[in-house]
Structures are given as structure tokens and as C-alpha cells.
Image (tube, rainbow, N blue to C red):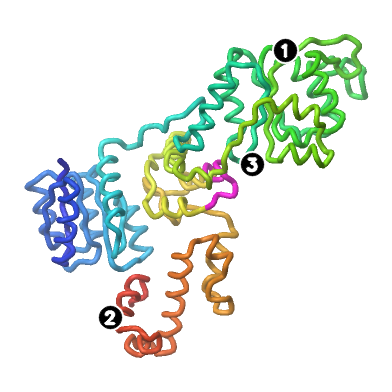
Amino acid sequence: MAAILIVDDERSMREFLKILLENAGYTSVTVGNGGAALKALQGQHFDLVISDIRMPDMNGLDLLARIKEIDATLPVVLITAYASPNDAVTAMRGGAYDYLTKPFKVDEIDRIVASALASATAPLKEEAPALAGIIGDSPEMLKIFDQVRQVAPTHANVVIYGESGTGKELVAKAIHQLSRVAANPFMPIICNAIPESLFESELFGHVKGAFTGATTNKTGLLEAANNGSVFLDEIGELPPLIQTKLLRVLQEREFKPVGGTETVKTNVRIICATNKDLEEEVMAGRFREDLFYRLAVVPIRVPPLRARKSDIPRLIDHFLRKYSELFGKQVNAISSYAMEVLMDYDFPGNVRELENIIERGVAMESSNIILPESLTLATHRREMARRLTDPDLPLLDESAVFELGLEEVLARQEKHFIEMALAKANNSKIRAAELLKMSFRSLRYKTKKYGMDT
């Protein structure tokens, strides 16, 4: 049973936390200041310390530093009623496991306590489970795993649909790795990255003298991948001439290199991917209908990251491990507030964008934990946050609500109007409360909540 030390100069908060933690199955000891906390640590083993930041004599940040001198591995969670970004950054960089702002939700403290205790025995979380490199255990991804396992042993052609950055190539590799030809080549081709004039040569090869610059014979990817798999990414961009020639390969299992007269036999499996709707492309006359039916024997649709958000924590753990090892650092966790920011974000760039965010965060972070300040999200979201404080905008901007969420929009608007009232009242809270038609006590609580007290 884990033992937790609670440090807070407010008796009501100590009692509240003690009841909460003991109902959750932990044992706890409460003290009212930093000096008493250090004495308790000398006389008893604790698995976790929860401390207020603002206390007389010794504040929570000083206590944190003293605790880390005694036992650098002991997790410390700091709590405060004054949401100061500077305090939060100092706390996390000083080695705090996480921080909470009052008032907090019961399930929030339960989650952070459980996470802090679990992290105490392992510097990095266990590697996320994966199927041939694909990480996720959401219902959406488990469905993908089932489809991959079913289709992989067959020789059926597959079309993988999904937005850019969702991991379509990983799905294609998984199909190949679980197939009967896994030991043979897997050849990826990005259809929109090769000039149309060179595409035929890349795919089918050419013979010497076939065109200007063809000074030697060249083996095409379809021949090089014989008895293996060819992955055609962005198949919707395939030029019309190549569509016709690829159809013959699928029908006859043979082709002729550019400029050649001899037929080359091939036995390749075609796996395609696209972010377009191929049926719509067929209806629009941009994609051959007969080729579509040859390719799309088995369709697999990879969901965007915003549709499987429960996979985000596992993906973050994986990328933290990957880039900590790559950069020779020990950034082994992410703060709950940074996690909350990411869980609320829609990721227009999907998994690729998440990986980029974590890579940059690990590279730039000076502590062992990713903080909200280390996250760099899409510019349009930062611009949306700025617009929320513009007094010339409507009170509730529809795009802002749908982008950031109603709670965040309301909180920003509330803070904005409190600032306006305080300015109009020359910083008199009593007068500002009257202007806002609210009680002085409510206004005082909200100014503390938003870190507006000086």
C-alpha cells in the first residue's frame, strides 16, 4: 500500500486530500509546512509527496529542491490556487512529477497520483504494443489489425485509404511483413513524387538507348520486387498512360521495359494508398474503372488521429522513448497539462504531426518532462487563441468554440472581461465586482484562478 505525504498550510485542504487518498486505498500523513514535511521524510518512507506551492516559511518549490537532495527518485506533485506559468515551469524543471491548480477534480488527482506512483519504479514506460510497427489499442486500430492479419497471408491487392500522416505506409509494411513473401523485397513508390516523364522507366525499367540519357539497361521496380510487394503511395496521382500499363501487369503478370521487345514476367503483390476517394475519381473520369476493381480487392481505411484519441498517450510514450534515445536525453514523461493540450488538439497532420511535436519537444526541453511551453502546435490554433481576447470579435465565435472547446472559450472570455472591469474600476475589486454584477468573494476567487492577483 503506497504511503503519501500531504503538505499544505490549509487544514481543510489537508483533510480533503487525506480522505480522498485513503478512500482510494492509500495511506497518508498530513503536515502543515515544509519543515514538518522534511522531519516526516526523515522518520518514515513515503512513495509520493503532494505539496502546496505557496506556504509560509518554506514554499513548495524550496521544499521540492530539498526533497530532491534527499531522494531524487521520490515523485512530488505540487498544487496551487495561483495558476502561475512561471511557478509551473520552475516546478517541472526542478523535478516535480506534475502540478495541479485548485480547484481540481477528484478524478484528476486520482489519475495523477496513480501515474506518479507507477512512474516511480520505471524511468520510461513500457514500450507501447504494436503490430508490425503500428501502435494503438483503440477499437478503430484493433479493427485495422484484424484486417491486416486476415489479408496479409493472401495475395489479394489492397487499397489503403486515409489522410496524410495517418500511417498508411506502416499498414502496407505490416501487410508485407505478415505475408508469405515477407523475406522478399518491399518496394515503395510515391506516385506524385516522380515526374511523369520518368515514371514509366522507374516502374517498368528501360533498355539501353530507349531515350536520350538511357546509357545502360535499368531494372524497374516491378522486376526488382518480383515475388515481393510493391507499395504505390498516392495511387490517385498515377498518370493515365501508367494506369493502362499497370492494368496489363495485373491482368497478364507481365510487361515490357521502355524501349524493350522482350516480355518480363513478374509476380508482385500491389498494395496502394491514397487520400482521395478512388470511386469519386472513377466517376470523374480521372481513374480507370477496370484498374480500380483490380486494385481495390480489399479496401482498408485508416482513421485520422482525432478519431482515435485514446491512442495518443501510447504514441507519445513511443516517441518519447525513440527521441530520448536518439538525442541521448532522458525526457521520459509529459506533464498532465501538456497531455491535456494534446488530447484537445485535432492534429490536422495526424500521427506524423504528433511525432514532429514530440521530437521537437524532446530536442528543446531542458528538464526530464515535456511541458506545455515545449509544445509547438499549428499556427492557426495559436491565432485562434489570440482572437479570443479581441474585444471587437463576437462574444462566442463559432469557429473558436469548435476549435478549442466551449470551456476554454468561456474561460478566456471571462478572464478578458474581468480584466476590463478591473481596469475600469482602477483595480478596485469591490467596484469591479459591482460592475460585473457578482459577489466580491466570487471575483476574488476568479482573479486567483486566472493568476491575476499582484
Name the residue beneath numbered marker 1.
Answer: 267
Q: Where does label 2 land, which residue? A: 441
- Nearer-N-terminus badge (2/3): 3
In the rendered image, residue 202, in percent from the top left (x then y), is placed at: 79, 24
Horizontal side of 81 relative to 372 (left or right) equals left
Amino acid type at image mark 3? Ser
Residue drawn where x is 26% and y is 48% of the image: 113
Q: Main secondary structure of the magenta part?
A: helix
The quadrant of the rendering that contains the N terminus is top left
Q: Check if mark 2's residue and mark 1's residue have beta carbons within 8 Å.
A: no
Amino acid tagged 2: Arg
Q: Which residue is mark 3?
A: 164
The magenta segment: 346-355
Specify the quadrant that holds the C terminus.
Answer: bottom left
Q: Quadrant of residue 198?
A: top right
The mark that comes first in sequence, 3 or 1, is 3
Indicate left or right for 70 with 398 as reference: left
Q: Dividing the picture into quarters, in which one does residue 170 lie?
A: top right
Residue 205 occupies quadrant: top right
User: Residue 132: in sight, yes or no?
Assistant: yes
Q: Tell me how far mark 3 sits from mark 1, CA to CA.
A: 29 Å
Percent position of residue 280, x then y? 76, 41
Q: Earlier in the sequence, mark 2 or mark 1?
A: 1
Mark 2 → mark 1, Cα distance in angstroms: 77 Å
- In three-dimensional space, the C-alpha distance between marks 2 and 3, rounded to whole angstroms, equals 51 Å
Q: In the rendered image of this protein, does residue 112 appear above or below residue 137?
A: below
* CB under 8 Å between discs 3 and 1: no
- For the point 45% across and 83% down, the residue is 420
